[in-house]
Amino acid sequence: MDFDVLRRNVLEAIKKTQDVKGLEQIRIKYLGRQDGELIKILRSLKDLSVEEKRKLGPAANFLRNELEAAFINKLENLKLKIRNSQSNLDVTLPGKKVPVGHLHPLTLMENRIREIFQSLSFSVVEGPEVESDYYNFDALNIPANHPARDMWDTFWLRQKVQSSKFKVQSLLLRTHTSPVQIRYMEKHQPPFQIIVPGRVFRYEATDATHEINFHQIEGLMVGEDVSLANFKYIIEEFLKQLFGKNIHFRFRPSYFPFTEPSLEVDIQLGGKWLEVMGAGMVHPKVFDAVKYNSKEVRGFAFGLGLERLAMIKYKIDDIRLFYSGDLRFIKQF
Ligand code: PHE
């Protein structure tokens, strides 16, 4: 048998085989080391002249390499076919859904409120959660030992700070975002309009409408002739954007030490009036505390509860759900 015939036979056989076992048998038959056809031919060469050996030796090697490559190629082909027939790949099946996180309902609400006030040219300002009693109370016209302090059940911290050579300040967890009014006015001059989102704390028993920590958004607008009419316009715009054009709201007289007059804003939903924020015209004593001339500037301030608004907007009946970490709750938003 000469090389050409061998070559043709092997390639033909490889082509015809359809399984791995059959392929291996063909390989052994032709390329086997013991008595494969190729080895037989090579053995028979020993009787040839040196010259002929020189010619046929490299040709035999070349053929061996070519045929081995053909075997490997076919083997890969067969394996691929097996793999494809075994995997139940159905390209028409719908894809697997990758779970994506949610924004917390409070984050959604806060983002929405920021958006609305930014559209009304308010800037967003933040302040510290650990406060001194000066910023949380005194500067807001709530002196120590005054019964008005009872309006805010306070978490006091054990540590005190030296605020100046003569004064030692008690620290607390802020009970509202109003101290940021003072911090901002100490460093800026009117006119300005800001909102202050942030976490606040109250030392209270928890129930469906009370939590020891919750969030407020403070608002403050100060200028030469800012009036309650300006407040009414801003708050009407805000409520309409948040709850729709047909929202009904009312002002109800109230009391806060740092505003005069003070009021609360209710909105009407499902036949009921729901309180959504406290507000009023900034008290002259507050302007005194930040060294503004209280005869020349006017301002309004308001503070709304983020949880309360989210509960109304999303019909949530228990404030404790916000902090429960319960995925069944969170996933609904
Ligand atoms: N700080 C008040 C509270 O927590 C709300 C408020 C803010 C009222 C600003 C009037 C003006 O109850």
Image (cartoon, rainbow, N blue to C red):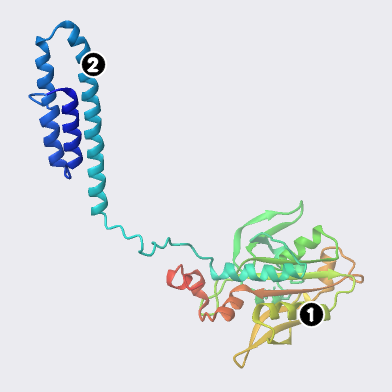
- What residue appears at the point 62 percent right and 73 percent down from the top-left corner? 306
Residue at which label 2 appears: 58
Residue at which label 1 appears: 233
Q: Where is residue 91 in the image (x, y as percent from the top left)?
A: 35, 60
Check the picture and name the quadrant holding the N terminus. top left
* Quadrant of the rendered image holding ligand 1: bottom right
Callout 2 secondary element:
helix
Q: Where is residue 119 in the image (x, y as percent from the top left)?
A: 74, 69
Q: How far apart are marks 2 and 1 (CA)?
A: 98 Å
User: Which amino acid, mark 1?
Assistant: Tyr
Q: Which of 19 and 137 is in front in this view?
A: 19
* Outermost residue toward the left in this view: 35
User: Which amino acid, mark 2?
Assistant: Pro
Q: In this view, does 56 lie above or below 314?
A: above
- Asked whether, in this view, residue 63 is left or right of residue 102, the answer is left
- What residue appears at the point 58 percent right and 81 percent down from the top-left corner? 312
Q: Which of the two discs, 2 and 1, labels the residue nearer the N terminus?
A: 2
Q: Which of 226 and 85 is in front in this view?
A: 85
Q: Is residue 167 above or below residue 142?
A: above
Quarter of the rendering containing residue 302: bottom right
